[in-house]
Amino acid sequence: MEAENVTRVSEFVLLGLSEEPDLQPLLFGLFLSMYLITVLGNLLIILAVSSDSHLHTPMYFFLSNLSFVDICFTSTTVPKMLVNIQTQSKVITYGGCITQMYFFILFAGLDNFLLTVMAYDRFVAICHPLLYTVIMHPRLCGRLVLVSWTISVLNSLLQSLMVLRLSFCADLQIPNFFCELKQMVQRACSDTFLNNLVMYFVAVLLGGGPLAGILYSYSKIVSCIRAMPSAQGKYKTFSTCASHLSVVSLFYLTLLGVYLSSPAAHNARSSATASVLYTVVTPMLNPFIYSLRNKDIKGALKRSFEMTVQIGQSPD
C-alpha cells in the first residue's frame, strides 16, 4: 500500500531560473521578448520560402522545416515558464510534465536530424553539383524529413514510457524551468539503471550518429573547396554553407556545453541557466543567421512585404 502511494505523483515543482521576487518581472519580459522574436522570425522564414517559387529547392525546404520545428521546440517550454511567473506558481502536473518532456525530446531530436540532412544537402550541392537535382529530388527530400519525424517520435515515446515506469518519492522539485529527462530520472526513488542505460545509449546513437554525419559531410566539403582553383570560387562556395555551419556550431556547442559541464559544476541552477542557450537562444538566432547572410531570403521577404503593401493600398 505504501509503494502504491509513492508511485502516484500528482505534480512536480519547476524551480525555474531564479527564486528572487525582484527578478521575476525582468525574466518575464526577457523571455516573452525572446519567444515572440523566435516565433516571428521563424514564421517569416516559412512565409518567404512558401511564397517565393525561387526558394522551392531542397535547401530551403529543409530550412522551412527547421523553422517550424524551432517554433514548436521553444513553445514546449517558454509559455509554461511565462505562465508560472505570471501566476507566481511553480507547479506542473504529472501528466503535464510527461507531455512537456515528450514534445521537448521530439523537437530536440528533429532539430538534430534536420541539421544533419541539411549538411548532406550542402555536401551534394558542393561536391556533386551536376548530380544535385538528380540526387536531391523532391521524393528523397520528403522521405528524409519523414524518417526524421519517425525516429524522433519513436525515441520520444520510448523515453517517456521509460519514465512512466518510475516511482517518485518526496523530492519532486526540478531545478529547471522545464521537465528535463535527466533531472526527472534523477528524482526517481526506484531503480533507474535501465533508464540510464537507454538514455545514454540513445544519446550516443541518435546524438553521436548525426554529429558524425555532419562532421563527415563538412570534411568532404572542405576537401572539395580546397580543390577549387580560384580564391573567389572558394569563398563563394563556402558562403553557401556558412549559415548552416554557424547554426550547427551554436546548437551543438551549447548543448554539449550544458551536459558536459554540469557534472563537474554540481550546480543544477547554473545548468538550468545554461540550458537557456540551446532551448531559447539558438532557435531565436537561427532566422537572423539564415536571413542576414542570405540574399534569396531577404529578397523574398522584401517582395512579400511589397506585395502586402500593394494589397493594402489597393481600392476596394
Image (cartoon, rainbow, N blue to C red):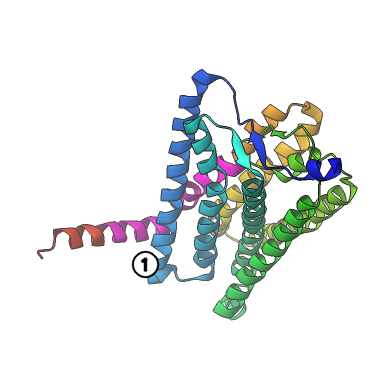
* In the displayed structure image, the side of residue 62 where residue 158 appears, left or right: right
Does residue 91 belong to the magenta stretch?
Answer: no
Q: Give the class, few, some or many, for how many residues have Cα within 10 Å of label 1's Cα (few <14, many ≥20).
A: some
Amino acid at pointer 1? Ser
Q: x%, y% of residue 38?
A: 47, 46
Residue at 79%, 45% (x, y): give it: 7
Q: Quadrant of the N terminus?
A: top right
Q: Considering depth in this image, is 234 or 255 the residue closer to the camera?
A: 255
Q: Residue at x 75, y 45 (%)?
A: 8
Q: Which residues are magenta?
A: 278-305
Front-most of residues 289 and 109? 109
Q: Nearer the viewer, residue 31 or 165?
A: 165
Q: Count the numbered circles shown.
A: 1
290 part of magenta stretch? yes
Residue drawn at (43%, 43%) of the image? 37
Q: Residue at x 51, y 31 (%)?
A: 85
Residue lying at the far front in this picture: please name it: 1
Q: Position of residue 252 (x, y in %)?
A: 68, 46
Relative side of 238 to 301, left or right = right
Q: Which residue position holds label 1?
A: 51
Q: Residue furthest left?
A: 315
Magenta stretch, main secondary structure class: helix
